[in-house]
Image (spheres, grey):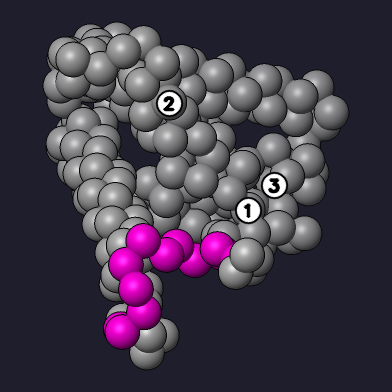
């Protein structure tokens, strides 16, 4: 068996392992998934001719663009349904937290995407935290492949993304918001609390921090 055949078999095993990770049995659009997991930095280090490289990069970028748009639509629909009392501004702010590169990169980390993707030598081995934009885009490309696998069924794709990622991310953001509010309340001291804290519990009432003597 040649080195090329060994490499192809190894890659096939990686793709199969990743299919198990994403939890979609009998995944048919394996070419789309392989495209999503092959970064242009790797493509341009191959020995293929320039036309082939450009074509492969084009497919990757198109897939990431599709996935990014679908993620945005799913998150918008989910927030609209879950938070009926929120204003447009509140929904928009919440959405931005869920679709920014930091959050999408975190989703990529949850899939251990760095263990299955092909990167160029200049990028390989770098920590995920330093490549948020790259892995955010790659996660979007994976979502694009999932969307195609589900035959462009928005509801099915939405269920997969929400169940695996979005619902938990929303809960975490809400918990963080509650913690921030509690911390703020703890830091809000009354004048009497402040005086007691600094050992001036006998100081007359009516004085506030910053008051000067006449």
Q: Earlier in the sequence, mark 2 or mark 3?
A: 3
Is residue 204 inside the magenta stretch?
yes
- Which sits in the foreground, 25 or 2? 25
Q: Residues within 10 Å of mark 3 (few under 14, many from 20)?
A: some
Please determine whether, in this image, residue 86 is positioned above or below residue 53. Answer: above
Q: Residues within 10 Å of mark 1 (few under 14, many from 20)?
A: some
Badge 1 element = helix
Q: CA distance from mark 1 to mark 3?
A: 15 Å
Question: Is residue 160 rendered to the left or right of residue 147?
Answer: left
Q: CA distance from mark 2 to mark 3?
A: 35 Å
Is residue 2 inside the magenta stretch?
no
Q: Position of residue 39 (x, y in %)?
A: 63, 41
Name which residue lies at 50% across and 35% down.
100
Q: Earlier in the sequence, mark 1 or mark 3?
A: 3
Question: Is residue 113 rendered to the left or right of residue 150?
Answer: right
- Considering the whole magenta stretch, tell me its main secondary structure: loop
Image marks 1 and 3: residues in contact by CB distance under 8 Å:
no
Badge 2 element = helix
Instruction: Give, as a single range, the part of the protein colored magenta.
Output: 201-212
Q: Residues within 10 Å of mark 2 (few under 14, many from 20)?
A: few
Residue 43 in which image quadrant: top right
The residue beneath circle 2 is 93
- Which sits in the foreground, 214 or 80? 214
Name which residue lies at 48% across and 22% down.
68
The residue beneath circle 1 is 131
Q: Position of residue 182 (x, y in %)?
A: 25, 57
The residue beneath circle 3 is 42
Q: Which mark is residue 151?
A: none
């Amino acid at each position: 068996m040649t080195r090329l055949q060994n490499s192809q078999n190894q890659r096939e095993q990686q793709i199969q392992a990743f299919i198990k990770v994403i939890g979609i049995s009998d995944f048919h659009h394996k070419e789309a998934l392989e495209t999503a997991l092959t970064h242009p930095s790797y493509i341009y280090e191959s020995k293929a001719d320039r036309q082939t490289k450009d074509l492969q990069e084009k497919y990757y970028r198109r897939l990431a663009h599709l996935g990014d748009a679908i993620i945005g639509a799913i998150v918008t629909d989910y927030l609209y349904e879950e938070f009926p009392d929120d204003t447009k501004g509140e929904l928009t702010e919440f959405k931005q937290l869920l679709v920014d590169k930091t959050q999408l990169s975190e989703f990529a980390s949850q899939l251990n995407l760095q263990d299955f993707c092909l990167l160029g030598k200049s990028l390989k081995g770098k920590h995920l935290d330093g490549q948020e934009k790259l892995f955010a885009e790659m996660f979007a490309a994976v979502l694009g492949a999932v969307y195609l696998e589900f035959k462009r069924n928005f509801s099915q794709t939405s269920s997969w993304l929400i169940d695996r990622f979005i619902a938990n991310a929303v809960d975490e953001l809400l918990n963080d918001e509650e913690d921030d509010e509690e911390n703020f309340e703890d830091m809000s001291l009354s004048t009497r609390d402040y005086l007691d804290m600094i050992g001036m519990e006998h100081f007359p009432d009516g004085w506030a921090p910053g008051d000067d003597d006449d």
